[in-house]
């Protein structure tokens, strides 16, 4: 298994009480809704919100999240590009991609960049905190990325 995949995703062990999450989403209303939903969960703490690839990279470095919830399409690039850069940081967080784009190509790029999961924006809202917990505690990569490996 590639060193940017699988077990190494969980290099940083979250505090059992709260998982630190960084949200990267360029649509303010979506970012605010995600933040409100996650903050309502006692086991999750939102440590920042950004709306660009550059913000994702800097935010991951400064905020030291356990998990980054990252939009696939951003104004200055893709979530796969941000993921690759974040995964090169010392003690990188797990990264979940959130996308409206449901293509094999998007999933493949996310997997190759080191993401541990790929969630569709059309998924049930309860899937997001569940995926965050799985990523934070090392249950990765997700079977949702497996079709990208064919």
Image (cartoon, rainbow, N blue to C red):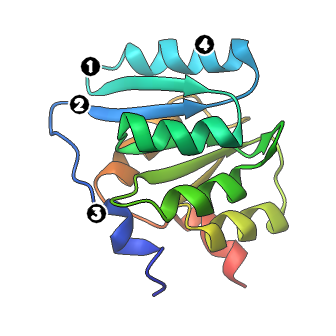
> Is residue 23 shown to the viewer in this render?
yes
Displayed quadrant of residue 17: top left
**Category of crowding for the residue at label 4, using alpha-carbon neighbours closer than 10 angstroms: few (below 14), some (14–19), many (at least 20):** some
Could you say where residue 13 lies in the image, as x and y percent from the top left? 21, 52
* N-term-proximal mark, 3 vs 4: 3
2 vs 3, front mark: 3
**Category of crowding for the residue at label 2, using alpha-carbon neighbours closer than 10 angstroms: few (below 14), some (14–19), many (at least 20):** some
Q: Which residue is mark 1?
A: 42
Q: Which mark is residue 11?
A: 3
Q: CA distance from mark 1 to mark 2?
A: 7 Å
* N-term-proximal mark, 3 vs 1: 3
Q: Which mark is residue 147?
A: none
Could you say where residue 44 lies in the image, as x and y percent from the top left? 32, 27
Tag 4 secondary structure: helix
Tag 1 secondary structure: loop
Q: Are marks 2 and 3 in contact (CB under 8 Å)?
A: no
Q: Which residue is mark 4?
A: 32
Q: Are marks 1 and 2 in contact (CB under 8 Å)?
A: yes
Q: Residue at x 71, y 58 (%)?
A: 81
**Category of crowding for the residue at label 3, using alpha-carbon neighbours closer than 10 angstroms: few (below 14), some (14–19), many (at least 20):** some
Q: Are marks 3 and 4 in contact (CB under 8 Å)?
A: no
Q: CA distance from mark 3 to mark 1?
A: 23 Å
99, above or below 102, in the image: above
Q: CA distance from mark 2 to mark 4?
A: 19 Å
Tag 3 secondary structure: loop
Q: CA distance from mark 3 to mark 4?
A: 28 Å
* N-term-proximal mark, 4 vs 1: 4
Q: Which residue is mark 2?
A: 18
* N-term-proximal mark, 2 vs 3: 3
């Amino acid at each position: 298994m590639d060193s940017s995949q699988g077990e190494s995703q969980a290099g940083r062990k979250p505090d059992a009480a709260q998982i630190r999450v960084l949200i990267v989403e360029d649509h303010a209303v979506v970012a605010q809704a995600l933040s409100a939903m996650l903050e309502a969960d006692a086991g999750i703490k939102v440590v920042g919100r950004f709306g660009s690839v550059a913000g994702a990279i800097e935010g991951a470095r400064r905020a030291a999240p356990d998990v980054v919830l990252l939009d696939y399409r951003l104004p200055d690039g893709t979530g796969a590009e941000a993921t690759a850069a974040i995964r090169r940081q010392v003690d990188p967080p797990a990264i979940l991609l959130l996308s409206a784009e449901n293509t094999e190509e998007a999933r493949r790029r996310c997997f190759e960049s080191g993401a541990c999961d790929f969630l569709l924006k059309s998924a049930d809202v309860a899937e997001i905190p569940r995926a965050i917990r799985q990523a934070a505690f090392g249950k990765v990569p997700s079977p949702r990325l497996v079709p990208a490996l064919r």
